[in-house]
Image (cartoon, rainbow, N blue to C red):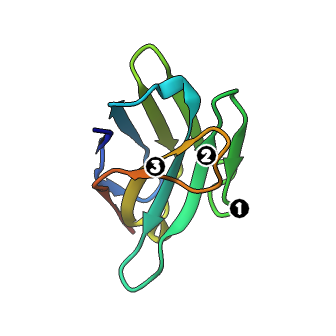
Amino acid sequence: QVQLVESGGGLVQAGGSLRLSCAASGLTFTTYNMGWFRQAPGLEREFVAALSWSGSTYFADSVKGRFTISRDNAKNTVYLQMNSLKAEDTAVYYCAARPVGYSDYRHWGQGTQVTVSS
């Protein structure tokens, strides 16, 4: 079955950087659009960034200019590089996969905690 496994979360000071990874298995990676979402305590899950199968990128306004998203199709992995982190970036970050031609994300990872201390 499809598995998405995130890694790379942790505790970092404000202004620092982290790179999250999401390793996918059980799917044809190149036929999926990949996304990152996050959920802070007491808040709803929100979109962070997405990378289409063709290389188009999308970012939430709150992270534009600070976060980048990339993928390595040979490794079935998508990355989220987070720079200039702020306390408000603290959340559990989730990787998700959306099949090309579909509007919803069908598969989700278990999440990785990112904590930014101010």
Image quadrant in which the N terminus is located? top left
* Disc with the residue nearer the chain's start (1 vs 3): 1
Image spot of residue 67 (x, y percent): 58, 46
* Disc with the residue nearer the chain's start (1 vs 2): 2
The disc labelled 3 sits on which kind of residue? Ala
The disc labelled 2 sits on which kind of residue? Ala
Residue placed under numbered mark 3 in the picture:
96
Mark 1 surroundings: few (<14), some (14-19) or many (≥20) residues within 10 A: few
Front residue of 31 and 21: 31
Picture quadrant of residue 104:
bottom right
The relative height of residue 57 versus residue 87 in the rendered view (above or below) is: above
| Left or right side of 72 for 42 | left
Q: Farthest residue in the top direction?
A: 74
The relative height of residue 113 versus residue 34 in the rendered view (above or below) is: below
Front residue of 67 and 16: 67
The disc labelled 1 sits on which kind of residue? Asp
Task: Determine which of the numbered discs, if any, sits on residue 61 in the image.
Answer: 1
* Disc with the residue nearer the chain's start (3 vs 2): 2
Residue placed under numbered mark 2 in the picture:
50
| Left or right side of 4 for 61 | right
Image spot of residue 60 (x, y percent): 66, 59
Residue at 65% across / 63% down in the picture? Answer: 62
Cα–Cα span, label 3 and label 2: 9 Å
| Left or right side of 46 for 118 | left
Q: Secondary structure at mark 3?
A: strand
Picture quadrant of residue 21:
top left
Q: Farthest residue in the bottom direction?
A: 42
Image spot of residue 54 (x, y percent): 70, 27
Q: Secondary structure at mark 1?
A: loop
